[in-house]
Amino acid sequence: MRAVGEKDAGSRVWTVPNILSFIRLALVPVFLWLIVEGEDIAALLVLVVSSATDFLDGYLARRLNQITRLGQLLDPAADRLYIFAALIGLAWRDLVPWWIVLVVVGRDVFLLGLGVVLANFGFGPLPVHQLGKVATFCLFYALPMIMLGEAFPAVAWWSQPVGWAFGLWGAFLYWWAGIIYAIETVRVIRLPRGTAPVQSDTLEL
């Protein structure tokens, strides 16, 4: 028989907002497969559904007072996975160069290493930086703009340049935020050992 605390924790996992987040994550491989197969219209529709569930789970979490730590971790993780899936799928079709994939994925691997360093010194993730949010926004919307031009050639004359502008600017800001994170990591690990760990509500930066 589970303790009351364990039962409450389990019920907090299976809230409606968290279930929507799990659905969003489950659509990632579908999204990737559609892009690789060149089904850009269907892939865009999946992305629209994903964005709708993202908005809905955030709204319901606030409205129903069901904000959980798990939900705060799932949302930015899903954003990352959709960005990675779009990059890999488009690179597979030679629509974007592989070096962009390496730039974006390499930055997150870099941050993962910094997170390990922080953990070794007894600190949690650093607070979200606004620059990281802007970078993620740029990348999250740049790739669908590129896909839009592939799905509907008639709009490619404006969607492709806009997509590339957002993508290149987003990749630059992505690493800029990563450098800020590295500087903050160095500052934090030099703090006295008795200092309280720095906490973050999400994994996003």
Image (cartoon, grey):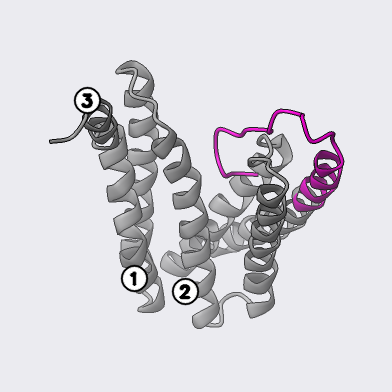
Which residue matches tag 3?
Answer: 4
Q: Which mark is residue 143?
A: none
Helix, strand or loop status at disc 1: helix
Percent of width and height locating residue 111:
68, 56
Q: Position of residue 98 (x, y in %)?
A: 63, 79
Is 88 left, or right, of 190 in this rendering? left
List x then y, in percent, for residue 71.
40, 37
Residue 89 is labelled as 2
**Residue appearing at x 28%, y 27% in the figure:** 5
Visible residue check, residue 49: no
Magenta segment: does it hold 189?
yes
Which residue is label 1 attached to?
34
Q: Is residue 152 visible?
A: yes
Task: Kindly state the secondary structure of the residue where label 2 is placed.
Answer: helix
Amino acid type, mark 3: Val
> Is residue 27 toward the left or the right of residue 76 in the image?
left
Label whose residue precedes the other's in the sequence (3 or 1) = 3
Distance from label 3 to label 1 (Cα)?
44 Å
Q: Is residue 28 above or below residue 79?
A: below
CB-based contact (under 8 Å), mark 2 and mark 1: yes
Tell me the distance, in whole angstroms, between the alpha carbons under discs 2 and 1.
8 Å
Q: Residue at x 24, y 37 (%)?
A: 14
**What's the magenta region?**
178-205
Quarter of the image holding residue 94?
bottom right
Distance from the alpha carbon under mark 3 to that under mark 2: 45 Å
